[in-house]
Structures are given as C-alpha cells and as structure tokens.
C-alpha cells in the first residue's frame, strides 16, 4: 500500500472513531431545547398560482377555468412568512392575532382598542403569546414577513394583499354545459391563518349530532377581507339565498366592521373548520368529517344587477354560519 493510499484511508477512520466510541443516548426535552433548530422552521414565501382548468369528474364534470392567484398588480403574491413547529407538551406557539398581543404587551398598541384588548386577553399565555398545544401537534402559522410600523394596526392587517381571478365555473355534460359563475375577481387581504394537525392518536369523540370523529384532526382558522370584488352569477338556486339567474355583483366587500359581532376580528371576516376521519351516527357510513365549521362576516353588495339593470343595494350584517357539520363519502 502506498503512502498516499494509507493517508486517504486514515482520514475517514479518524473522523469516525470518536463517534463509534460514543454511546447513543435519547435526549430529553430540556436537552432538546438547547439544540439549534429546536424552535422550528420559518419559510419566507413568494408565489403566483395559475390554473387553466380544474375538473371534478363523475358521470358529468364540474370545471373551474382560468384561475389565478397573485398580487393585485399581477406579480407574485409575496410578503408571506410561514412558521412550522412540532409542539412539545404544553408549548405555546404563534397563533391567530398573537403578534398583536405581543405588541400590546410592550405598549406599541393601545388596549383602549377593544380588539387589541381582546387579543391580549386571548393570546397572552404564561409569559408567552399564542396558543398552547399538545405534544406532537403540527402547527403552521401564516403571517407577514414585513408588517410595517409595529405601532400601526392597518399596516399589519393589510400587509398581505392578493387578487383571485376565475374565468368560469361550469357544469358540463356529454353534449351540453352550463356556466354557473363567471368573471370572478376578488381583491383583498389575508390575515393571520393557522393550520394545525392535532396529535390525538387513535382516540375518538362523539359530536352533538351523533357522528364519531377522530381526535387526530386538521384544524383550519383564518381571517381575511375582500375589499373589492365582482362576479356574474349565471345560474340561481345557489346556497338558497336567491332563486334567479342573470345576477351581476360589483364592488363586493366582505369584512366584519358592523353589527354586534366585531370584537376580536379587527374588521376582518373569519372562517374556521376541523377535518378528520369520521363515522356517521345516522347512516353508519365512514368518510371525511368536516365539523365545527364557522363563518362570520358582513357582506356588502352595493351594485346588484339583474339582467343588466340595478335593483339597488344588498347588505348582510352579522352573517354567521355556525353549528355546522358534514360527513362526506362516496355513493
């Protein structure tokens, strides 16, 4: 063996030998808390989504055409920050308006504002700010990368702006098709959004409607605002609100600034839902359970046209969908 070969072989042996002699030991939570990276992962995100067609196919087909999600000026949707953590037992992680609570605790935001006071009471937990989770819960929080002036609520709430456009939503058969909605455009803002996968193991619980659902579930919470929207409603009988066709809506706004249901929402609409495996209490069918669904908003439609003619203005105040559960399965 040449001298060079001996040197090359000795290098990995020198590197490996200290680790081969060491005993492998499990790390407890206290030790793990000192390991670099234990605090989770942060992702700064920019993206634009374009989709020519999305279809659900059964005997016929339901299709969405020409979908795009971008910044309002058509560039990439930006200024988004995802924080991803796997929680320890009782760990407090960022959730909802916890950043507002953090700023209020340092005096950057005044608790004379009832929304700020609500956030501080809701998200201040044992010297930290957020929500307490269980061991093994996967927690994903979406907020702004740059929220602007820390003393400005408006800059925080309007930090992530977006535009969603959809050309058509169409029901299609073998020979004919019907356009349900067309020319959809929604401009607005994305508030704090959370996706949590709860680590409930194999345990289950029974809902008030008798359905049995898994305690390992996906929980979704979001706040958002539509500041300017428009669409053509080509076919009626949708969600039982109106029973006619040929509706055009302009200057649509969805928020939560009126009525008796505004506190804690900072003027933004909100939506929550939980998804898990479930079994129907009435039919015994197994499927996807969508439960604890809640939607809260005020809806403004100041330009409401039928057949191209305005019929006036339409407004909903304290529009709430709650106590809603669904069991989804094939047939």
Image: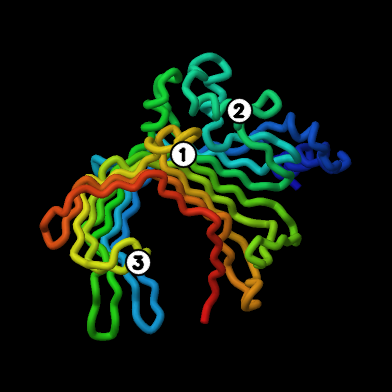
The residue lying toward the viewer, choosing from 255 and 192, is 255
Q: CA distance from mark 2 to mark 3?
A: 43 Å
State the residue position of label 2.
121
State the residue position of label 1.
261
| Secondary structure of residue under mark 3 | strand
Q: Is residue 302 visible?
A: yes
| Point 48% across, 38% down: residue | 192
Q: Is residue 70 visible?
A: no
| Point 61% across, 61% down: residue | 276
| Point 67% across, 47% down: residue | 137
| Point 53% across, 59% down: residue | 324
Residue 87, quarter of picture: top right
Q: Position of residue 158 (x, y in %)?
A: 36, 32
Residue 275, quarter of picture: bottom right
Q: Which mark is residue 317?
A: none
State the residue position of label 3.
54
Mark nearer the viewer, 2 or 3 = 2
| Secondary structure of residue under mark 2 | helix
| Secondary structure of residue under mark 1 | loop
The residue lying toward the viewer, choosing from 226 and 174, is 226
Mark nearer the viewer, 2 or 1 = 1
Q: Position of residue 259 (x, y in %)?
A: 40, 38
Residue 300 in the figure: left or right of residue 97: left
């Amino acid at each position: 063996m040449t001298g060079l070969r001996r040197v090359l072989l000795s290098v990995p042996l020198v590197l490996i030998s200290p680790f081969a002699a060491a005993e492998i030991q499990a790390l407890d939570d206290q030790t793990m808390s000192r390991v670099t990276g234990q605090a989770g992962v942060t992702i700064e995100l920019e993206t634009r989504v374009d989709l020519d067609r999305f279809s659900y196919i059964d005997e016929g087909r339901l299709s969405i055409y020409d979908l795009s999600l971008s910044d309002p000026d058509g560039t990439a949707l930006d200024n988004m920050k995802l924080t991803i953590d796997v929680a320890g037992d009782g760990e407090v992680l960022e959730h909802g308006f916890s950043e507002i609570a953090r700023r209020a605790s340092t005096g950057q935001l005044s608790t004379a504002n009832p929304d700020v006071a609500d956030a501080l009471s809701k998200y201040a937990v044992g010297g930290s700010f957020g929500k307490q989770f269980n061991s093994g819960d996967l927690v994903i929080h979406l907020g702004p990368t740059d929220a602007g002036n820390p003393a400005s609520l408006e800059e925080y709430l309007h930090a992530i702006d977006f535009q969603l456009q959809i050309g058509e939503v169409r029901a299609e058969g073998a020979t004919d098709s019907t356009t349900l909605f067309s020319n959809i455009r929604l401009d607005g803002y994305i508030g704090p959004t959370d996706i949590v996968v709860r680590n409930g193991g194999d345990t289950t619980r029974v809902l008030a409607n008798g359905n049995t659902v898994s305690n390992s579930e996906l929980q979704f919470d979001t706040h958002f605002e539509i500041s300017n929207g428009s669409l053509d409603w080509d076919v009626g009988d949708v969600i039982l609100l109106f029973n006619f066709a040929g509706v055009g809506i302009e200057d649509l706004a969805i928020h939560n600034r009126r009525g008796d249901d505004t506190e804690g929402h900072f003027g933004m609409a909100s939506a929550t839902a939980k998804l898990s495996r479930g079994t129907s209490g009435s039919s015994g069918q197994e499927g996807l359970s969508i439960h604890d669904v809640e939607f809260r908003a005020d809806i403004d439609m100041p330009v409401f046209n039928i057949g191209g003619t305005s019929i006036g203005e339409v407004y909903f105040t304290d529009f709430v969908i709650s106590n809603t559960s669904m069991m989804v399965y094939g047939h």
